[in-house]
Image (cartoon, grey):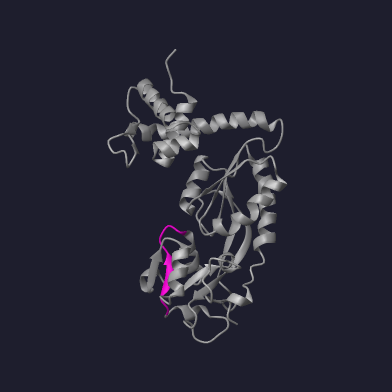
Amino acid sequence: MENLPTTRQLQYLLALAEHRSFHAAASACHVTQSTLSGGIKDMEDILQSPVIDRTNRRNLRLTPLGEEILGAARKMITRLEDIAYRARRAGAPLSWPLRMGIIPTIAPYVLPKILKPLQEKLPSLELYVHELRSHQLVEKVHDGSLDFGLMAFPYDTKGLAEHVVMEEEFYCAAAPGYLRGEGDLNLKDLRAEKLLLLEDGHCMRDHALDACRLEPVKELKTLSAASLSTLIQLVHTGYGITLLPAMVANDNPMLPEGLDLRRFSAPAPTRKIGFARKKKGLREADIFLVFEELEFLMKINTLDLQIKKTIMKK
């Protein structure tokens, strides 16, 4: 019988493709680096061709063969996991780990409020959480690396099922005294301002522009940053203004003292928060059970998104 790569070797390859580091991949697989490296070498001996380009240790890459078999390896592992899930599901719900993706403009403001209560409510749940940008999250839900994602809409999920949980307003953030007058703003008030946004690749950039019905970016005075914390610090120095979702502005200890947060007059710009998953899958029952609890926790913890009077000018 022909010698074939093992399931474990394929898992090592998938981990290397994701982490691009032998050390990180070994940690993700819960093995030593030498064990993982040996497994990859054994697979290469079976295939009689390298799957890892070792010419540059600092920038690990797959060979063309490695890239070619990556998709097949992912599908095979997913099918094997489904077989194991079928067997475990017959015994009890949540008997198989779930993998959730979450975008950076939601993760730090929601996860601390929901993970512990979720574990208390569903003690048998083994949930792995990965923080990713929207395009990465959608890609990994499609290929089976993630079971579902918590993200902001609208976004092109390429056919995934979307479950909207809540809608939140955007607020305008500015340095003390930067904005004229007091009270709510009108969207047209932003057109003459230097608007600071997240860089391309963050869906909140597009949500802010679309929700506020602003002109294309090339016609705005903008600066792009990689993180919300960078934007907020620049805004606090008076360099410009930015738009913050309510969950970021609400009772956030990381906001600089005195930051001027203004609501917009109706209709206020908003974004929607919810889940994305495959439309059909073996784990639907478990996913919906987790959805139900997460939705409840998110609503009681983040739906009342009123800005504290101590940080908002009236």
Residue lying at 44% horizontally and 78% vertically, measured from the top left: 191
Residue lying at 68% horizontally and 55% vertically, measured from the top left: 297
Q: Is residue 278 above or below residue 191?
A: above
Image quadrant in which the C terminus is located: bottom right
Spot the residue most to the left. Answer: 55
Q: Is residue 117 above or below residue 299?
A: above
Residue 42 locus on image (x, y percent): 39, 23
Q: Is residue 66 above or below residue 117?
A: above
| Residue 33 lies in quadrant | top left
Residue 44 locus on image (x, y percent): 36, 25
| Residue 248 lies in quadrant | bottom right
Count of marks placed on residues? 0
* Front residue of this view, candidates 112 and 221: 112
Residue lying at 43% horizontally and 23% vertically, measured from the top left: 5
Q: Is residue 194 magenta?
A: yes
Residue 148 locus on image (x, y percent): 57, 46
Residue lying at 49% horizontally and 51% vertically, measured from the top left: 132
Chief SS of the magenta region: loop
Residue 156 locus on image (x, y percent): 50, 54
Q: Is residue 296 magenta?
A: no
Left or right, 303 with reference to 38: right
Left or right, 110 with reference to 122: left
- The boundaries of the magenta stretch are 193-202
